[in-house]
Image: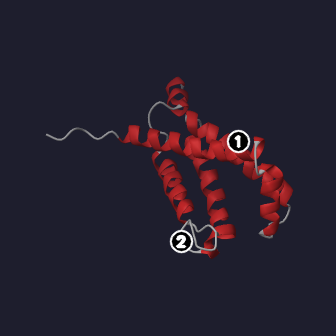
Amino acid sequence: MAEASRPGWGLALLRVVLGIIFLVHGSSALFFEPGVAGVAAMLAAQGVPAANAGAWVVVAAEFLGGLALLVGWLTRWVAGVLFLGTLVALFVAYAENGFFVFRPAGEWGYEYHLLLLAGLGCLVLGGAGVLAMDDWRSARR
């Protein structure tokens, strides 16, 4: 007889890994290279208006969103915000470079962003999984 599936554990694993990825990206821009100024320069080079303010929004969303995913707080909402930000990044900066992440000329394609979008979409649709603050909040109601 087959064992019962454990989708809650799979979602928790996905949530934690995506949380780490976004937290590391956000903390890198906050505390290390390229810094918020580097993110602003990249946004300005892409023609994004108000690149300085946009850089702070992107960095804060990645850092705080990654932290929220890691602990499973407001998971569906946070994953939705990160999904939209990742979708914008895909079209603004990476779609023109083609599919593959590593290209001969050094530009980055969008396959990595598709993977992030798939994972974030799973969290939007499936929730946080087990061991999440979302469970603790709902149990208190």
**Looking at numbered disc 2 in the image, what kind of residue is underneath it?**
Phe
Q: Quadrant of the C terminus?
A: top right
Local crowd at mark 1 within 10 Å, few (<14), some, or many (≥20)? some
Image coordinates for residue 121, horizontal then vertical, percent: 51, 54
Q: Return the x and y of residue 27 as percentages of the image width and height.
A: 70, 42
Residue 117 place in picture, x, y as percent = 54, 58
Q: Nearer the viewer, residue 77 or 87?
A: 87
- View extreme (front): residue: 104
User: What kind of colouring is applied to the model shown?
Assistant: secondary structure
Report which residue position mark 1 lands on. 27
Q: Residue furthest top?
A: 140
Quadrant that contains the N terminus: top left
**Residue 30: where, in percent of width, then height?**
76, 43
Q: Residue at horizontal 50%, vertical 48%? A: 123
Crowding at dot 2, Cα within 10 Å, few <14 / some 14-19 / many 20+, comes out as some
Along the horizontal axis of the image, is 3 left or right of 39?
left
SS label for mark 1: helix
Which of pointers 1 and 2 lies earlier in the amino acid sequence? 1
Residue at 60%, 55% (x, y): give it: 83
Q: Amino acid at mark 1?
A: Ser
Q: CA distance from mark 1 to mark 2?
A: 27 Å
27 is higher (above) or lower (below) than 118: above
At x 49%, y 57%, the residue is 118
Of residues 59 and 68, which is closer to you in this image? Answer: 59
The numbered mark at residue 99 is 2
In the drawing, does residue 51 fall left or right of residue 108? right
Residue at coordinates 49% horizontally, 52% vertically from top-left? Answer: 119
The dot on residue 89 is: none
